[in-house]
Image: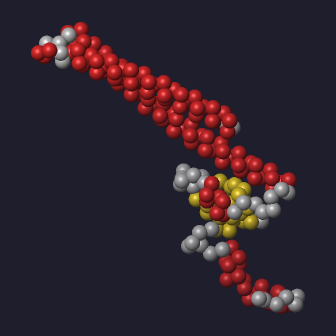
């Protein structure tokens, strides 16, 4: 589903919800006028008004149920729109990177709330975290041939892990080639 289709579906559902609210409001007005007739002088009232309250209450309950279902559909349509927009932005960023229009784009590994792992291109870690929906977390940056460098406060960077394991060898390698450590 593209962004335009998702927006059109959202607008259509908002219109359906407004129409359902109008129908419910008309029914509520009918109920209040029938209740007033039923409670007329001396409690005797109009018997036909009393009899009409039952079906009106059923209609009001049906309208409330319809509105609840439309609200659920509306919530799902908003979610689909957000997903379509995020996908569109990801595709645009990847295409811009391939054309060389963007100077830097990183491939990030993202954990979804349902346990899936997703890889998406973003301008930076901060841009990715800003664009992600609640529950999605950036867990790493893909570097090289599928190697993932973990990201997070409790994790050590990929380079720090390499230096911790092979730091002396790296310093010796650099010294052999005349490169001084900073």
Nearer the observer, 130 or 138: 130
Nearer the observer, 24 or 89: 24
In the current view of this chain or complex, which residue is farthest to the front? 41
Which residue is drawn at the image coordinates 66% and 33% (left, top)? 5
Residue 115 shows up from this direction: no
The number of discs equals 0
| Residue 83 found in image quarter | top right
In the current view of this chain or complex, which residue is farthest to the left? 42
| Residue 110 found in image quarter | bottom right
In the current view of this chain or complex, which residue is farthest to the right? 177
Quadrant including the C terminus: bottom right
Q: x%, y% of residue 93? A: 75, 53
Nearer the observer, 150 or 102: 102
Left or right of 57 on screen, residue 95: right
Which residue is drawn at the image coordinates 67% and 39% (left, top)? 3
Q: Is residue 149 above or below residue 58?
A: below
Left or right of 32 on screen, residue 43: left
| Residue 97 found in image quarter | bottom right
Nearer the observer, 81 or 177: 81
Q: Is residue 22 above or below residue 140?
A: above
Which residue is drawn at the image coordinates 78% and 85% (left, top)? 170
Q: x%, y% of residue 167? A: 72, 85
Which residue is drawn at the image coordinates 64% and 63% (left, top)? 126
Q: Is residue 158 above or below residue 93?
A: below
Q: x%, y% of residue 19? A: 48, 24
Quadrant including the N terminus: top right
Residue 140 shows up from this direction: yes
Q: x%, y% of residue 24? A: 39, 24
Left or right of 3 on screen, residue 58: left
Q: How is the image coloured?
A: secondary structure
């Amino acid at each position: 589903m593209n962004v335009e289709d998702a927006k059109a579906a959202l607008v259509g559902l908002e219109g359906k919800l407004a129409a359902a609210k109008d129908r419910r409001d008309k029914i509520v007005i009918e109920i209040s006028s029938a209740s007033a007739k039923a409670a007329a002088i001396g409690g005797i009232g109009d018997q036909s008004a009393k009899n009409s309250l039952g079906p009106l209450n059923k209609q009001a309950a049906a309208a409330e149920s319809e509105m609840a279902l439309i609200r659920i559909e509306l919530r799902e349509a908003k979610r689909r729109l957000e997903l379509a927009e995020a996908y569109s932005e990801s595709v645009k960023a990847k295409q811009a990177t391939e054309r060389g229009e963007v100077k830097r784009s990183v491939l990030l590994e993202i954990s979804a709330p349902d346990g899936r792992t997703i890889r998406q291109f973003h301008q930076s870690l901060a841009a990715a975290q800003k664009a992600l929906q609640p529950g999605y977390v950036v867990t790493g940056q893909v570097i090289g041939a599928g190697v993932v460098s973990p990201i997070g406060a409790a994790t050590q960077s990929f380079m720090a892990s390499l230096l911790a394991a092979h730091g002396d060898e790296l310093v010796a390698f650099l010294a052999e080639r005349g490169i001084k450590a900073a």
